[in-house]
Image: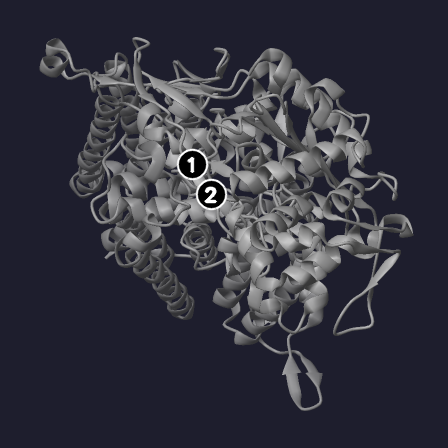
Amino acid sequence: MSSISVGSPSINISQPKRRHWRRRSEFGMILLASGLTICAYLIVSLSLTSKIPSNLQFFLGFVLILGLLAHLATRVLAPEADSVLLPTVVLLNGLGYVMISRLDVYSVHKSAPWQAAWTALGVGVYILTLKVVKRTRDLDRYRYIIAIIAAILLALPLIPHVGENIGGARLWIHIGNVTFQPIEIAKLLLVIFFASYFVEKKELLSIGTLRIGNRLFADPRSFGPILLAAIVSLMAMAIEHDVGFALLLFVLFISMLWIATGRFAYVLLGIAVFALGTWMGSHLLVQVNDRIVVWLDPWKYSSGGGFQPIQGIISLAAGGLGGVGLGQGLTGLYVPVPQSDYIFVAFGEELGLFGSAAIIVAFLIIIGSGFRIAVAAKSDFAKLVAAGLTILIGFQSFFILAGIERILPLTGVTLPWVSYGGSSLVANYVLLALLMRISSESEERKLEDLLKE
Amino acid sequence: MKVLDKRIQWIALILIGCFLLLFIQLNNLQIRQASHLTSLPYNFRNHQALLYLPRGSILTSDGTILATSKPTKDAFKELREYPTGSLFSDIVGYDSIYYGVTGVEAVYNSYLSMHPSSSSSLGGILTSQDTTDDVILTLSTKLQQVAVQALAKYPIGAVVAIDPQTGAVLAMYGKPTYDPNPLTSHNISQERAYFASLNPSSPTSPLLSVAYQQRYAPGSTFKVVTSSAVYQRDPSLATKNYPYLHYLTLPQSNSLLHNFANEGCGGQLPILLEQSCDTGFGQIGLDLGANNLAGEAQQFGFNQVPPIDLTNVAKSNFPSAASFATQLPFLAYSAIGQGNVQATALQMAMVAGAVANDGVMMVPHVLSQIQDSLGQTVKQYVPQPWLYSTTPSSASSVTSDMELVASAGTASNLFPPSQNIAAKTGTAQTSQAAGNNNWLVAFGPNGNGVKPQVAVAAVVPYFPGLPKDTTGDQIAGPVVETVLETALSLGL
C-alpha cells in the first residue's frame, strides 16, 4: 500500500463546505447532550434538596467548555471524523457524572470531584491523542515496543507496594493516593499490537503451510508471539484474580484473529481454551467459583455474595417502565458500589426502562459507528484497529450489563464513560480519539479520491 | 478487504444480538417480573419509610434509654442508637434499613414511628400534628446488669425473671447476643460485615435469643408440671409409695431408666420431687398416662407460642399424647423433661410463675406503658391471665413440695431459709451424654400470706469445656439465686 499524504492543508481549503456539515451536526448534538446533562443535574438537585444547585453556573460552564473543547479540537485535528461518536460519549459521560454526584450523598468520600477531574483529563488526553497520532499507520511502527509496554502494564499491579487489592482483584496501582488500573491502557495497546501482527502474518495464519497427513495447517511458528501475548495476559489475570478483563481480552483476541484470518477453527479453539480456563479457574480461584455459584442461585446467598446481584435486579424492577424519577431512587442505599460496576441499576431505578433502554441504545450507536468506521477504513490495519476498539467497547459494556441483568455471571468491569473510574475514563477517551482518527482519515481519503477523479 | 468487512459485519451482528438480549432481559426485569421482585423481602424499600422520620425512644422502668433517634446531617436524616448496646438487644431488637425491624422496635412500631397525634385537646384536633411516642418497658436496668454478671462465667446461657402476678418481665438476658448499633449504622458495608459476622443463617446465631428463641430439654424442672398433673388429674398417685429403685425397667422394651449417677431413690411424691427421683417420676408418667401428661403440658403453655410482645418467639415442645401409644418408654422420659421435651428459659420461668400465682399463668409482657412526647400516658399495660394452668390447691401443693427442694433437696443451701423459696433443679443429659444442660427454676418469697414477687428460670446449656458431671444446682443455681435475691432486695 503506497503512502499518501493525508490531511494536507490544501484539502482543508478546497472542501470547506463538505467538511463543515459533519462538525456542525456534531456541534448541535454536543449542545443537546450538554443540555440534557445540565437538566439532569438540575432535576437531581431539586429532587434531593428542593434547591437550584449553588454551583449551577460553574457546572454549566464546565460541561459546555469540555464539550466545546473536544469539539473544537476535532474540528482542527480530525475534521472529517464521524459526527455522532463524540456527542454520544459526552451524553454518557455527563449522565454518568450526574448519577455519581447524586449517589455521593450516601458516602463520606465524595467521588464526583474526582470524576470531574478525570473527565477533564480524559478530554485533554483525547485532544492530545488526536494531536500525537496524526496518521493511523504511525501506530503500526512500534508493534513490539507497544506489546512490551502492554505486558509491563499488565504486570504492574503484581509488584508489591505498588499494586493494590480492591474487592479481591489485584488490578490497581497507586501513585500517591491516586489509584489507577493499568489494564485499561493495556487493552488499547493490545488492540494495536494484535492488529499490526495479524495484518502482517495474515497469510501465514490463514493459509496452511504445514502438512500433517493430507491436511494443511497454519505454521505453528507464526502463533508464537500471539500465544505468548494471550498466555501472558491470561496468566496475569489469573494471578490478579479478575475474570472480567481476562474474558474481555480473550474475546478481543479471538475476534480479531477471526476477522484477520477467517479461520473458524481459531474461534472453536479459542472457545475450547477459554472454557477450559474457566473450568480450571472455577476450581482454583475462589473468586471465579463464587461468581458462578452466586450467578446460578443468588437467593441462596442473599446476605453474602448474592446480595449485590439481588439488590441490583430489585433496583431495576423498582424503576419499572418510567422510573421513580432522578434523585428519588434508593439504589445508593442498598446496592454496594453503586457508582462503578452497578451504576446502570441506578439509572434503571430512577429513569425506568425508558432510561435504561436509552443507555443501551447509546452504546449501540457507538458500536454501530465504530464498526462503520472499521468497514470504511482504507487499510487492513486501520480496519482491524477500529474493529478491535469497537469490540472492546461493545463487549465490555455487554459483559457488565449482562452480569447486572444476570444473563452471565458478574464480571467486574466498568460501564465505559458512565461508571466512576479514572483509568477507565481516560483510556476510553484515548479509544474514542483513535476511532475518530481512523474515521477522519478514511473520509479524507475518500474526498481525495473524489478530487482525483 | 471486502472479506474483512464481511467478518466485521458478522461481529457487529453478534454484538447487536447480545444487546437485543440485554433489552429483552431489561423488559423481563423491569416490567414482567417487576411486581414480583419488588415484593420480595429482600426489597428494603418496603420498610424504608421508617427511616427518614424521627422515632420515639425505648426506656426501662427506671428511665434508662435503650433506643433513641438522633438527627444527622447525612442522607438518612436520623440515626437510631442503642446506648446500652447488647444489654437489652434480645428485647429491644433493631430497626435496620437492611435487616428489618425486630423485637420491641417491631411490636410497638406504630407508636414509635411518626403517626398522627391522638391528642384530645381542641388545639390538637385543629392542628393535628404528627408525633412519636416513647415505649417504657417493665425491665429493670439494675436487675438486667446483675443477670449479665451472674452469667459472666459461661459463654452461653439465659436467665429470665418475671413477676408471677402480672406476667411482667423484670429481666431477660441470653448469651451469646449482639450489639444492635452496627446494624443501624449508616455505613452500609460496616452494617453488612457485622451482620455476616453473626452467622445469620446458623441455628446458633447470636441473633437468636437464648432466652426465648432457643429450646433445651428442661430435664427435671419439668417435674413441676408432672407433679401438678398428679395433684390435679390423679391425686391418688400423690400418696402412692414408689419403690426404692436404682433403675426403672421400661415397658415395651428392654431399656432401663437410670437415676442420676445411678443413685437409688423412692417414696411418695414430695420425697420424689425433693430428691428429683427419675425412677419415681418415670413411673408416675406411666401411671398418669399420655393424655394426662400431654394435657398438663398444654395447660402450662407447651406447644403454644407465648403471647409475649416480642418477635419470633419460640414455642416449647411436648410430644402429642398419640405419639406415646407405641412409645411408652418416651412417656417415662417425657415425665422427667427428657426425650422430645424442649423448653425455652422464658417458658420455664412462666411455668414457675404459674405455680407461684395460684395456678394462673399471666400473659408475659415487656411493655409497661406508652407515653407521648409530652410525657402523658397514651397506653398503660393491663395484666391479664393467659392460661389457667392448674388449680390453686394443686399449685399450693406443688409449691410446698418445691420449698422442700430448696430447704432439704437438690437445691438446698442456695437460698436464705427465711424466704421459703420454692425451687426445682434440672440436669438434662444432652445427646450422647457429652455433658448436661443445667437448669434451675425458683420463685418466692412464700408462706405467711406472702405472695411470691419473682419467678426466675436459668439455663446454662452444655458447652465444650463444661465438665461432664455438672448439675443444675451447681451451675444454674447461683445464677437464679443472684437474680432472685437482687429482685427481692430491689423490691421489684
Q: Which mark is residue B199?
A: none
> Which residue shows up at 88% across the image and 40% down it?
B467
On the same chain: label 1 and label 2?
A: yes
Instruction: Please state the horizontal and vertical placement of residue A188, each as a whole percent of the image.
Output: 52, 45
- Count all numbered tags in the image, as a single digit: 2
Name which residue type carries label 2.
Answer: Tyr
Q: Which mark is residue B385?
A: 1
Who is closer to the viewer here, B139 or B293?
B293
Instruction: Note whether B293 is above or below B396 in the view shown.
Output: below
Tell me the colour scheme of the image.
Answer: one colour
Q: Is residue A83 visible?
A: no
Instruction: Note whether B25 is above or below B167 in the view shown.
Output: below
Return the chain for callout 2.
Answer: B
Instruction: Note whether A158 is above or below A373 in the view shown.
Output: above
Who is closer to the viewer here, A44 or B305?
B305
Farthest-out residue, bottom: A214
> Which residue shows up at 77% across the image and 40% down it?
B274
B37 sits to left or right of B289: left
Mark 1 vs mark 2, CA separation in Å: 8 Å
* Residue where numbered disc 2 is placed: B388
Disc 1 vs disc 2: Cβ atoms closer than 8 Å? yes
Q: Is residue B116 visible?
A: yes
Indicate the quadrant where residue B97 lies.
top left
Instruction: Please state the horizontal and vertical placement of residue B65, each as a whole percent of the image.
Output: 48, 14
Instruction: Please state the horizontal and vertical placement of residue A199, each as a whole percent of the image.
Output: 53, 61
Indicate the quadrant where residue B151 lies.
top right
Q: Secondary structure at mark 1?
A: strand
Q: Callout 1 environment at 10 Å: few (<14), some (14 to 19), or many (20+)?
A: some
Who is closer to the viewer here, B359 or A100?
B359
Indicate the quadrant where residue B72 lies.
top left
B82 sits to left or right of B113: right
